[in-house]
Image (cartoon, rainbow, N blue to C red):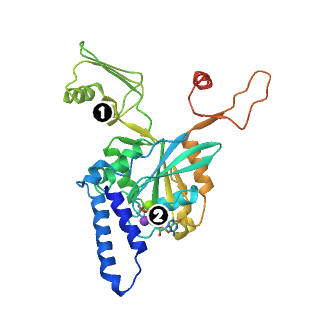
Amino acid sequence: MGILEKIGEIEREIGRTQKNKATEYHLGLLKAKLAKYRQQLLEPTGKAGAKGEGFDVMKSGDARVALIGFPSVGKSTLLNTLTTTHSESAGYEFTTLTCIPGVIEYNGANIQLLDLPGIIEGAAQGKGRGRQVIAVARTADVVIMMLDATKGEKQKELLTMELESVGIRLNRRKPNIYFKPKKGGGISFNSTLTLTKCNEKLCQMILHEWKIFNAEILFRDDCTSDEFVDVILGSRVYMPCIYVYNKIDQISIEEVDRLARKPHSVVVSCNMNLNLDYLLSTTWEYLALVRVYTKKRGERPDFDDGLILRTGCTLEHVVSIGNL
Ligand SMILES: Nc1nc2c(ncn2[C@@H]2O[C@H](COP(=O)(O)OP(=O)(O)OP(=O)(O)O)[C@@H](O)[C@H]2O)c(=O)[nH]1
Ligand SMILES: [K+]
Ligand SMILES: [Mg+2]
């Protein structure tokens, strides 16, 4: 039996057990066991942690949005408000221990919203269930980083660093650098504009570090050496991210205004249902989905049955879907 099943069983038994003097000892033991299993689930070295129990959620719908944030910022409350799925929400940290999927219907599209356990500093190294959470975040089309509006910018900085450390780049374009390792011929370095943050010598030194002595490089943008490293390593994920400041019911209107003006930010109160429409329209915009209506020659288009496509797709995509 997996740890999640054990937890479920104990929770059910606690629910079944009447609270009185005679059951006091039994209930106490059950709660202690529950605490032990919950703790095991959060341990980086625990077997359950390594396997990622409870995180194998199928992709479904037209797009996937992952909710990440510190514990108790209101992620589950958001899922409960926007979808018909229920995820336990409570005032204590690590209420959510697994990945809970819900569906948002918007503009005729089905968007999968994933509630996830809270993550903390050190998540990328395996603290809490951080590694599994980050692995799920990588598979998303958009990340919603939920922040507690009462708690300042520290959470945002820490989470951004955690994601950076595992190769997730938020709200940044893929560096426009052409890079191709070769069999011979040394390193050929070119740029289409004057570089101010990086140069040929630095690139060569970096490449030698990776034991690459033959390659073709073309900078098409004024990129940094960090971005060059990202290109050499590949495996980077460039992810649109919305910073959602929740619990604005707890702060002054001046503070709300200040947070709302930050780049990529949306201010909300999940409890009081404030500004969630705007969060949905922003999410739609960040997903960059478009609806395409097909019609037969001489007939009117069927506006009830559009295709959901990503921005940048071509007519060929539409035709190939139509031929399925
Ligand atoms: N004041 C206020 N409290 C909120 C709001 N949204 C959520 N909360 C409260 O914040 C607490 C934590 O909410 P959860 O939804 O459990 O938070 P979470 O991020 O899912 O927490 P974990 O699963 O433990 O990581 C609960 O007591 C909620 O009622 C809000 O908009 N305003
Ligand atoms: K919580
Ligand atoms: Mg939760």
Q: Give the image location of residue 61, x and y in percent.
A: 54, 41
Q: Which of 295 and 125 lies nearest the eye of the viewer?
A: 295
- In the rendered structure, which disc, 2 or 1, sits on the residue that comes first in sequence? 2
Task: Name the residue rendered at 39%, 68% in the picture.
Answer: 11
Foreground: 295 or 283? 295
Q: Position of residue 171 (x, y in %)?
A: 46, 42
Q: What residue is disc 2 on?
A: 88
Q: Is 159 situated left or right of 66 in this image?
A: left
Residue 212 - label: none
Residue at mark 1: 229
- Distance from disc 2 to disc 1, alpha carbons, whole Å, reads 41 Å
Q: Give the quarter the ligand 2 occupies.
A: bottom left
Whether residue 257 is situated above or below residue 288 in the rendered picture? below
Q: Is residue 285 above or below residue 93?
A: above
CB at disc 2 and ligand 3 closer than 8 Å: yes
Which of pointers 2 and 1 indicates the residue nearer the eye?
2
Where residue 69 sits: x, y (%)? 42, 56
In the image, is 295 to the left or to the right of 291?
A: right
Q: Amino acid at mark 1?
A: Val
Question: Callout 2: few (<14), some (14-19), or many (20+) C-alpha neighbours within 10 Å?
Answer: few
Q: Residue at point 30% right, 33% down?
A: 229
Give the image location of residue 184, x and y in percent.
23, 13
Q: Amino acid at mark 2?
A: Glu
* Residue 120 visible in the snapshot: no
Q: Callout 1 environment at 10 Å: few (<14), some (14 to 19), or many (20+)?
A: some
Q: Is mark 1 within 8 Å of ligand 1?
A: no
Residue 70 visible in the snapshot: yes
The residue drawn where x is 28% and y is 56% is: 127
